[in-house]
Every structure is written in structure tokens, then in C-alpha cells.
Image (cartoon, rainbow, N blue to C red):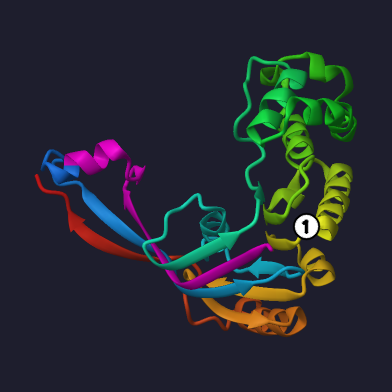
């Protein structure tokens, strides 16, 4: 039975001015070869408690940088947590950045096969879905051309069409509703609605309030990496809008940044 359980989960991320610390950066820091570059520590998530059961449809709201995407990636197992307990039972399917992972010099058809296999599709299963993926993308003869010739909108269409060909058990969605032009976005919303109707658990982060009101049974308001409020969507939205949208918020929206000191020179 599908389930997501987070108990007092926190996540700290170390950054340099150039971005997240890579293994090379860590090794330089460990052996004192970094020249004194400053390290910032981000409290990306702080003390998050969450229990998601079959049938739940959870919406995440909050300002940019509040921790919505980070929380989804923790649920997906992409980020290792710093402290607390994470238990996820069931097959997880994600709709995050659908533009990631294209082979730029391969054709659209070849990318459908490549991305499909990465999503765990069998050869036989993918073969039965390829035409449906192509039809949904509306790219037609462009599928015979290398993806490097596509516009950003065309790549978004193709990536979304491939990613949503899955049959999810736990579905995690991060702003995938914004795929393509206006007409395609409406198709995307209907596709996600169809997926939500069959998935056991759905957690979605989006700024589309009407979508969240229509489809979510529970809303979580993220702020500074913490859960500020959760519960009935109408009640949480009312509090969120009165505090954030009317300028009454006294707390920052982004993750808490601390200076962890300088690396040894």
C-alpha cells in the first residue's frame, strides 16, 4: 500500500558563491586547499512532519524558495535528508523538470524511446505507447528531426508527453502544468487530472490556485523550509492570501541562510 511518512525531517545544503558544493569542493575544503572561500549553509527544510495515505491529494503552496520543490525531491529520494525519518512505500513517479535528459542530436522519436526506457518502460510497453506520445505532443513531422532544432516550447511538449505516459502509484508534480503554450497547457491540465484519478497518492506544487482548489483534498503552506499551515484548501488559502498577498507577512519566504564560516586557506 502506497504511503509517504516524514517525521521531523530537516535538510541542510552547503553552497559556495558559485552554487552547490560538489565533491571536488568538499575534498578541497577537507584538505585545506580551497583558499578561504566562504561557505553558506541553507536550512532548506526544517522539522517537517507529514503523513500521506492512499487517496490523498496534497497541494503545496508558498513563495518561490519556500521549500516546495525541495520537499518534493526529498519525497522522491533525490535529496538525502540531514535528520529525521523518511519512509516512502510504493512506486514513485515524478513530473519535475521535463526538459532534463534530452539527447540533443537524436530525433524526437529516438528521445521518446530513450526517455521511456529511463522511466522504466519495457520495450513492449513503450512500443504500445509511442504513437500516443507522439499524438499528444502534436509535433508531427518534427519528431523526425533532432531535438536540437526544437524551440523551448516544442521540447516542453515532447518532454511532458513522454513523462506523462507513465502509470503512477505515487505521483509527485512540480509546476509541470506550465508546459507549452496556452492551448497545450489546457491539455496538460487534463492529462494530469487523468493521472491524479488513477494514482494512489498525489503531491503537487503549482502557483495555479484554481487547479489546487479543484483537485486537492489537503493544502500545505511552506515558508522558509517549514510547514507554516496545513489543512482544508479553502482555509489554508484564506490565511495564505491574507498574510502573503496583502503584505502582512512578517517572515521571509526563502530558506534560512547561515554562514558556515570560511574554508581553510
Q: Is residue 207 visible?
A: no
Magenta stretch holds residue 10:
yes
Q: Would you identify the image quadrant in which residue 5 lies? A: bottom right
Q: Nearer the viewer, residue 48 or 154?
A: 48
Q: Which residue is drawn at 49% across and 64% down?
A: 86
Q: What stretch is highlighted in magenta?
A: 1-28
State the residue position of label 1.
199
Query: In which quadrant is the N terminus drawn?
Result: bottom right
Instruction: Look at the picture and state if 81 lies above or below 140.
Output: below
Left/right of residue 214 with respect to residue 149 in the rendered view: right
Residue 160: which quarter of the image? Answer: top right
- Residue 177 in the image: state x and y as whole percent: 76, 51
Q: Position of residue 62 (x, y in %)?
A: 60, 69
Dot 1: element:
loop
Above or below, comparing residue 1 to residue 156 in the picture: below
Q: How many labels does the image show?
A: 1
Within 10 Å of the Cα at label 1, are there few (<14), some (14-19), or many (20+) other Cα atoms?
Answer: many
Q: Does the magenta stretch include residue 103?
A: no
Q: Can residue 232 be seen in this view?
A: yes
Residue 57 found in image quarter: bottom right
In the rendered image, the vertical position of residue 102 relative to residue 222, given as above or below: above
Q: Residue at x 10, y 43 (%)?
A: 32
Q: Position of residue 261 (x, y in %)?
A: 18, 58
Q: Residue 28, percent across and down? A: 18, 39
What residue is shown at x 60% (from left), y 31% (from top)?
101
Residue lying farthest front? 1
**Quadrant where the image shows the C terminus:** top left
Amino acid at each position: 500500500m502506497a504511503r509517504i511518512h516524514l517525521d521531523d525531517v530537516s535538510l541542510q545544503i552547503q553552497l559556495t558563491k558559485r552554487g552547490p558544493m560538489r565533491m571536488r569542493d568538499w575534498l578541497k575544503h577537507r584538505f585545506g586547499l580551497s583558499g578561504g572561500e566562504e561557505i553558506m549553509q541553507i536550512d532548506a527544510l526544517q522539522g517537517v512532519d507529514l503523513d500521506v495515505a492512499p487517496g490523498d491529494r496534497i497541494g503545496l503552496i508558498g513563495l518561490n524558495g519556500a521549500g516546495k520543490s525541495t520537499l518534493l525531491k526529498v519525497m522522491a529520494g533525490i535529496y538525502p535528508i540531514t535528520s529525521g525519518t523518511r519512509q516512502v512505500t510504493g512506486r514513485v513517479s515524478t513530473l519535475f523538470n521535463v526538459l532534463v535528459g534530452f539527447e540533443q542530436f537524436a530525433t524526437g522519436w529516438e528521445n521518446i524511446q530513450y526517455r521511456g526506457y529511463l522511466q522504466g518502460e519495457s520495450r513492449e510497453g513503450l512500443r504500445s505507447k509511442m504513437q500516443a506520445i507522439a499524438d499528444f505532443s502534436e509535433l508531427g513531422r518534427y519528431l523526425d528531426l533532432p531535438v536540437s532544432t526544437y524551440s523551448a516550447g516544442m521540447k516542453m511538449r515532447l518532454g511532458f508527453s513522454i513523462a506523462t505516459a507513465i502509470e503512477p502509484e505515487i505521483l509527485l508534480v512540480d509546476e509541470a502544468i506550465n508546459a507549452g503554450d496556452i492551448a497545450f497547457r489546457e491539455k496538460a491540465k487534463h492529462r494530469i487530472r487523468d493521472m491524479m484519478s488513477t494514482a494512489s497518492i498525489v503531491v503537487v506544487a503549482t502557483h495555479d490556485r484554481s487547479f489546487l482548489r479543484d483537485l486537492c483534498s489537503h493544502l500545505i503552506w511552506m515558508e522558509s523550509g517549514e510547514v507554516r499551515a496545513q489543512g482544508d484548501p479553502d482555509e489554508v488559502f484564506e490565511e495564505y492570501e491574507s498574510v502573503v498577498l496583502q503584505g502582512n507577512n512578517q517572515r521571509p519566504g526563502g530558506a534560512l541562510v547561515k554562514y558556515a564560516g570560511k574554508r581553510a586557506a
